[in-house]
Image (cartoon, rainbow, N blue to C red):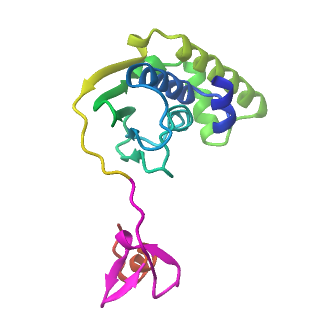
């Protein structure tokens, strides 16, 4: 499972490890991975852990059962539509605490000022922290609450309409009208200066 997640994501890191652990809880408590849309994941961030969630729970953007809410929170809600059960899982910040050297190296890597040797040390520390997260007792890593499932509409296929500016097809629910003409969001924003 870990090797598959690393291969899918591209590298090993604490966020991916957390996504693996969240997925394990979901599959244990709510059932098998989704073949279609029987399981829904609502993720409140776009972090590394979401890749593990897609891979392991079967909730994906393409199937419409992975819903992204850009709240920047390490919180994940899962709904099993067949059993009507739902879990809300939030990660405990303390589980991700690192030592001063790790934090300093992380800043250098992020700012692209780290030497090759510093990047290597950072990678080693990051991998070590990911193993710590994989081994951490569940109650130290996350808070799990059973919640009422919110109604989530199943994925729908919509008609595409052509943008009058770029001529590219746009899903009808995302079209913006200007003087009665169909526009995609980027073209609408260029013409009006309004951001969506």
Q: Could you say where residue 148 lies in the image, as x and y percent from the top left? A: 21, 31
Q: Could you say where residue 160 lies in the image, as x and y percent from the top left? A: 45, 75
Please identify the quarter of the rendering in which residue 146 is found.
top left
Q: Quadrant of the N terminus?
A: top right
Q: Residue furthest left?
A: 148
Q: Tally the numbered discs.
A: 0
Find out whether residue 44 is within the magenta segment: no
Q: Could you say where residue 23 lies in the image, as x and y percent from the top left? A: 48, 26
Residue at figure coordinates x 59%, y 31% from the top left: 106
Front residue (pair 117, 176): 176
Judge from the rendering whether residue 30 lies leftward or rightward of residue 115; answer left or right.
left
Q: Is residue 186 above or below residue 16?
A: below
Q: Is residue 137 above or below residue 57?
A: above
Q: Is residue 166 above or below residue 2?
A: below
Judge from the rendering whether residue 24 lies leftward or rightward of residue 130; answer left or right.
left
Front residue (pair 127, 41): 41
Judge from the rendering whether residue 59 lies leftward or rightward of residue 82; answer left or right.
right
Q: Could you say where residue 86 lies in the image, as x and y percent from the top left? A: 30, 30
Judge from the rendering whether residue 148 lies leftward or rightward of residue 134; answer left or right.
left
Q: Quadrant of the C terminus?
A: bottom left
Residue at figure coordinates x 50%, y 25% from the top left: 18
Residue at figure coordinates x 44%, y 19% from the top left: 28
Front residue (pair 188, 157): 157
Front residue (pair 189, 59): 59
Find out whether residue 165 is within the magenta segment: yes
Q: Which residues are magenta?
A: 155-183
Residue at figure coordinates x 36%, y 46% from the top left: 69
Q: Residue furthest front?
A: 82
Q: Residue furthest right?
A: 116
């Amino acid at each position: 499972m870990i090797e598959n997640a690393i291969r899918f994501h591209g590298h090993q890191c604490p966020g991916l490890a957390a996504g693996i652990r969240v997925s394990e809880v979901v599959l244990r408590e709510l059932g098998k991975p989704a073949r279609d849309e029987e399981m829904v994941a609502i993720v409140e961030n776009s972090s590394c852990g979401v890749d593990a969630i897609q891979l392991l729970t079967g909730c994906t953007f393409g199937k419409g059962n992975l819903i992204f809410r850009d709240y920047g929170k390490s919180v994940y809600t899962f709904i099993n539509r067949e059993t009507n059960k739902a879990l809300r899982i939030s990660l405990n910040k303390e589980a991700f605490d690192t030592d001063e050297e790790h934090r300093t190296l992380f800043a250098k890597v992020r700012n692209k000022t780290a030497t090759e040797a510093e990047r290597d040390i950072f990678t080693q520390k990051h991998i070590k922290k990911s193993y710590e997260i994989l081994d951490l007792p569940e109650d130290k890593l996350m808070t799990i609450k059973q919640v009422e499932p919110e109604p989530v509409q199943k994925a729908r296929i919509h008609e595409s309409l052509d943008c009058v500016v770029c001529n590219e097809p746009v899903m009808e629910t995302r079209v913006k009208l200007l003087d009665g003409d169909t526009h995609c969001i980027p073209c609408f924003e260029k013409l009006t200066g309004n951001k969506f």
